[in-house]
Image (cartoon, rainbow, N blue to C red):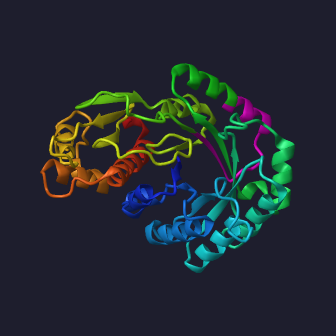
Amino acid sequence: MVGYWPVLKGREGEFKALSQLGDRDVSHLHPLLEVCPSDGGTTKASVGFVRKVRESVPAGMTVGVDTTHVRTNDEGRPLIVELAEDLEQWGVPIAPVIRLQDPDDHVLACGEAARLHSGNVIIRLGSLTADPDPVADAPRIARALSLAKVGPERCHLMVDMGEVSSDRDVSRAELVVRNVLDGLGDQGWHSVVVTSGAMPPAISALPRNEATPLTRWDWKLWGRLADRSPQFGDYGIAHPAMQTGGRAPLPSLRYTSSENWWIYRWDRPETGGNNSFYDLCETLTSSDHWPFVGPEFSWGDRELARCARRQPGPGNATSWRAWGTSHHLAHVTSELANPAAS
């Protein structure tokens, strides 16, 4: 089965979804977690991240850890080493993420962190605003691996195209990915992953009180590269960029199907609150894209079915993100396990 590499923001909703994974989803799932900045400073971000990983990641699952957005702790020490030490004590294996733009001291720190665990690293090409397109820079990759003291056989190569939001984007991204893979050749990588994301940065302009389909362009990009047999990566149900919190959204859900996400946004009742989420779930569970097995498909689907029955607890934005992410992870894992059915 093709491995699945979701790039997830290290936030409450995503961690809750990971904590509820079924046994069928764990063995081929390789989450890459991005450490999110905290208003309370680096120490709060670090402590919170370790706690959530320890409480949420299933036993035996290795997670990628990307500290691009939070480089050092409050004492100036590389955060990736601190996280690696803490998680090694809790028996949670990680693979540090190296980007070619990283300074030498961070690459060295990633090597140190890797040796505390399995010895594996993830080279993540592309996706940054300053240098979004991955390039086949074999000398820089070789130098980074040399600094980290890691061989290609211990390296997961992730070619990350960031946002793709149209057929034109997919065509351009396909060409870039092929150029990268051709330029680097087969160097005995542990694995090769192609990652992109197609969820828009905001859904607030979409219609209310109806389901709106959005094309999963990231899935289409991976499909066009089937002849190269890469593993699949996406950004779950989120936009690729690290976004800060905004106003409390309307009751909403991002629900994955084979070709689309279905975006649900429901007006709040005149009395306020989130009870219209029950109406949203009633509509979802009677739709054509509700799974054949219904609530047994994932933990998130069980919660959505509960809300459709109007059992108390319509949730909030974090809950909706967790339930949607749970369904998405189960759906993509199922797609990859049964390609003929997708």
Residue 130 place in picture, x, y as percent: 72, 38
Q: Is residue 232 above or below residue 313?
A: above
Q: Is residue 328 above or below residue 112?
A: above
Q: Is residue 177 above or below residue 303?
A: above
Residue 16 place in picture, x, y as percent: 39, 61
Residue at 76% x, 35% y is 135
Residue 229 placement, left or right of 111 = left
- Is residue 60 in view from this perspective? no
Q: Residue furthest front?
A: 271
- Is residue 185 in view from this perspective? yes
Residue 63 place in picture, x, y as percent: 56, 61
User: Is 190 covered by the magenta stretch?
Assistant: yes
In the image, the segment drawn in magenta is 177-195
Residue 133 placement, left or right of 65 = right
Residue at 39% x, 57% y is 17
Residue at 49% x, 55% y is 28
Residue 208 place in picture, x, y as percent: 26, 30
Residue at 75% x, 43% y is 186
| Of the pair 22 and 252, the residue shown nearer to us | 252
